[in-house]
Image (spheres, helix red, strand yellow):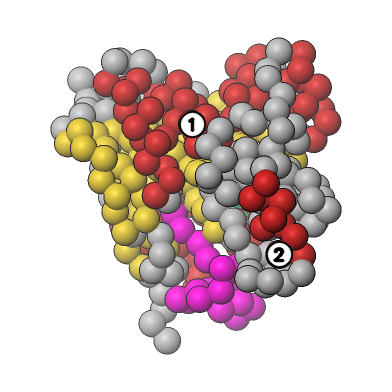
């Protein structure tokens, strides 16, 4: 029997790790643990970039992206541009389990969620409306697409099964219908029991150009540790894009990227092109929730 382990992006991922680890400790399957962990973050109105209280798009609607991937058979469920549902990851789970498809968007996803009786609920909160107004006026945060964080969760259960999941309101002031990396398999997430799982957070437009999560899982498949894979994968993308964009040591929010991975032994790694990325993790062997600052990678120019 392997030892379970779970990790989630950002300090707000602590509640995901808390909830998910309880299930893993009880022997509940990894996809349930990942989904439940993400659900907890989605319904927390204090997290201003995921689910309820998430960042509105350009016209003031909260459009959510979410996904789940099961590493045993590479099955995926994802939704994009969904409004009116506090838990888009629950829709993603239903897509994975109840349809022959992998991705549903917008109204189609919402109708599907209704047909399965998922709860609708308001996403805008007083503070998200206030933040949106300020952004539109260029107060505080600039009117550039700043302000965006994804909850990404990777986990291994005691049966050796791996899963990954994501949920986000995407980039602030995004165009209606804009889809980021978070619901795109291989870009924002990937999971394969044979080698490991990875999730990404940050500028989706750059992350998807490198299929970053898939790349990191492939590096683990080739023998890299989770830490080595995160550093090499992210640095490789930074190098590859350096002629068109400067992603090294990103100071601007809109250029930040970070990755988090778990290998098939439950070892966790992370990397970012800035110094602000922290993640939460715990495991059966060390059942305390640690908040860890990720290694910063860059070209050092
Ligand atoms: C997106 N990657 O929609 C997401 C946003 C994010 O940290 O994670 N920001 O592009």
The quadrant of the picture occupied by the N terminus is top left
Q: Is residue 99 magenta?
A: no
Name the residue at 41% across, 35% down: 16
Q: Marks 1 and 2: CB-CB under 8 Å? A: no
Name the residue at 43% across, 45% down: 12
Quarter of the view holding residue 240:
bottom right
Q: Mark number for residue 186?
A: none
Residue 180 in picture, x, y percent from top left: 66, 51
Q: Is residue 145 above or below residue 244?
A: above
**Which stretch did the figure color magenta?**
240-259
| Residue closest to the far left | 285
Residue occupied by mark 2: 134
The quadrant of the picture occupied by the C terminus is bottom left
Which of the two residues, 226 or 46, is positioned nearer the viewer here? 46
Name the residue at 37% across, 56% down: 278
Residue 295 visible in the shown view: yes
Characterize the magenta stretch by its predominant secondary structure: loop
Residue occupied by mark 1: 40
Local packing at callout 2 (Cα closer than 10 Å; few below 14, some 14-19, many 20+) is: some
Residue 271 in picture, x, y percent from top left: 38, 60
Residue 167 visible in the shown view: no
């Amino acid at each position: 029997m392997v030892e379970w382990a779970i990790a989630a992006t950002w300090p707000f991922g602590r509640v995901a790790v808390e909830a998910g680890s309880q299930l893993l400790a009880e022997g509940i399957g990894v996809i349930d643990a990942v989904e439940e962990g993400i659900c907890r973050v989605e319904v927390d109105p204090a997290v201003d970039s995921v689910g309820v209280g998430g960042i509105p798009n350009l016209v003031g609607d909260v459009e959510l992206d979410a996904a789940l991937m099961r590493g045993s058979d590479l099955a995926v469920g994802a939704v994009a541009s969904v409004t009116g549902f506090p838990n888009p990851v629950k829709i993603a789970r239903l897509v994975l389990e109840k349809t022959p498809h992998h991705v549903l968007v917008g109204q189609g996803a919402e109708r599907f969620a209704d047909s399965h009786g998922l709860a609708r609920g308001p996403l805008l909160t007083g503070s998200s409306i206030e933040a949106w107004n300020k952004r539109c006026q260029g107060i505080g945060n600039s009117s550039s697409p700043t302000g965006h964080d994804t909850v990404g969760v990777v986990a291994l259960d005691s049966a050796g099964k791996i899963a990954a999941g994501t949920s986000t309101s995407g980039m602030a002031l995004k165009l209606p219908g804009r889809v980021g990396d978070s619901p795109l398999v291989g870009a924002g997430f990937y999971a394969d029991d044979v080698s490991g799982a990875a999730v990404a957070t940050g500028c989706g437009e750059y992350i998807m150009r490198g299929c970053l999560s898939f790349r990191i899982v492939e590096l683990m498949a080739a023998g890299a540790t989770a830490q080595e894979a995160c550093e090499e994968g992210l640095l490789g993308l930074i190098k590859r894009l350096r002629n068109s964009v400067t992603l090294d040591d990103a100071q601007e929010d809109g250029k930040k990227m970070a990755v988090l991975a778990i290998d098939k032994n439950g070892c966790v790694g992370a990397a970012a092109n800035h110094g602000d990325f922290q993640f939460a993790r715990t495991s059966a062997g060390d059942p305390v929730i640690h908040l860890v600052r990720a290694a910063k990678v860059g070209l050092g120019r």
